[in-house]
Image: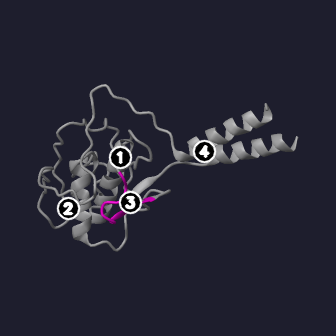
Amino acid sequence: MPRLVFYVLFLALYISHSSASYCLCKDGVDEDELQKALDYACGFGADCGPIQPNGPCYEPNTMKDHCNYAVNSYYQNMQSAGGTCDFAGAATTSPTPPSKVSSGCIYPSSPGGSGAGTTPPSFGTPTPPATTVPDASPLTPNPETIPDVFGTAPPTFKNGSSTIKISNADLLVLLYLAISWLAMNA
């Protein structure tokens, strides 16, 4: 009976655990570094349409807020292909979305979501959208001229490929359950 109680408690803790993770630009990072992270994210996998003028995530129109959306979109879209949430130290993961978000703007917390409900960008030769920031002219990053400062080249995909996603926590639970089952039946 104690073993059954232990399993029920363990499963209750595991099931209630949320694996939502957001990628956000760090506070106190220089605007030039935020711009580099924004350009890289928009050029290599982020859906930056929602932070364009009249987009649902355009307001608040600040470099930090646009950077938050872009790096999070990149992270959600590219983590299965090796994309990380570091951006040369300009970003980090968080269990909660940013506090300043305009109504109608949705920060995806898992792959496949976006602020405007659009489909994820196609992968191939990236064609980055223009990005507008406060007190600056529209920027159109060229993926061929953006240095690989984040330690990863843009991922390549084969048509029709699929990815099975499983976290380390999921693997640990499966391993624990398998070992427990073997021990009980031994």
Q: Name, please, the residue furthest toward the right.
A: 1
Circle 1 is placed at which residue position? 82
Q: Is residue 124 above or below residue 65?
A: above
Cα distance between the residues tagged 2 and 3: 17 Å
Identify the residue position indicated by label 3 in the image.
Answer: 24
Residue at 31% over, 38% down: 120
Query: In the image, what residue occupies the spot 47% across and 52% down?
Result: 21
- Earlier residue among tags 1 and 2: 1
- Please state the extent of the stretch shown in magenta in the rendering: 84-93
- Queried whether the magenta region covers residue 23, the answer comes back as no
Expressed as whole percent of the image width and height from the top left, the position of residue 152 reads 27, 52
Residue 126: percent from left, percent from top: 18, 42
Quick check: 131 above or below 80? Answer: below
Q: CA distance from mark 4 to mark 3?
A: 27 Å
Q: Nearer the N terminus, badge 3 or badge 1? A: 3
Cα separation, mark 1 vs mark 4, equals: 21 Å
Amino acid type of the residue tagged 3 in the rendering: Leu
What number is the disc on residue 133? 2
Query: Residue beneath label 4, please?
Result: 172
